[in-house]
Amino acid sequence: VQDKRSRKAFAPSSGIMQFLTEAVLEEGLITRAVRDAVALCPPLVITQAEIDELFGKLRRALDSTLSHAHGLGLTS
């Protein structure tokens, strides 16, 4: 969200979801953007180590997206 306090979402025209989609792909993850959320679909046989790896990659992609949003002046 653009503003945590008010839960205001980023405007679709900001391109943040597209940036996040590309960032997760660069990390080797496949996700789906669903409105203002990201859907993960891990296999049912995922191991704890693979879950840790998945969330590490997702965290890096989200951190990169947040930095991008800061750079665009979209967040405070």
Image: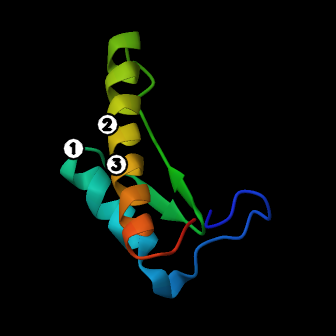
Label 3 crowd (10 A; few <14 / some 14-19 / many >=20):
many
Residue where numbered disc 3 is placed: 61
Sequence-first disc among 1 and 2: 1
Q: Mark 1 points at which residue?
A: 28
Pointer 1 local density, CA inside 10 Å: few below 14, some 14–19, many at least 20:
few
For mark 1, give the secondary structure: loop
| Whether residue 63 is situated above or below residue 51 in the rendered picture | below
Residue nearest the observer in this picture, 67 or 33: 67
Residue in the picture at 44% in, 71% down: 16
The label nearer to you, 1 versus 3, is 3
Dot 3 falls on a residue whose secondary structure is helix
Which residue is painted at 38% across and 20% down in the image? 52
Q: For this view, does 62 lie left or right of residue 34? A: left
Instruction: Say which mark, if any, is on residue 57.
Output: 2
Cβ atoms at labels 1 and 2 below 8 Å apart? yes
**Left or right of residue 3: residue 23:** left
Question: Which residue corresponds to the image point at 58% horizontal and 74% vertical from the top-left?
Answer: 10
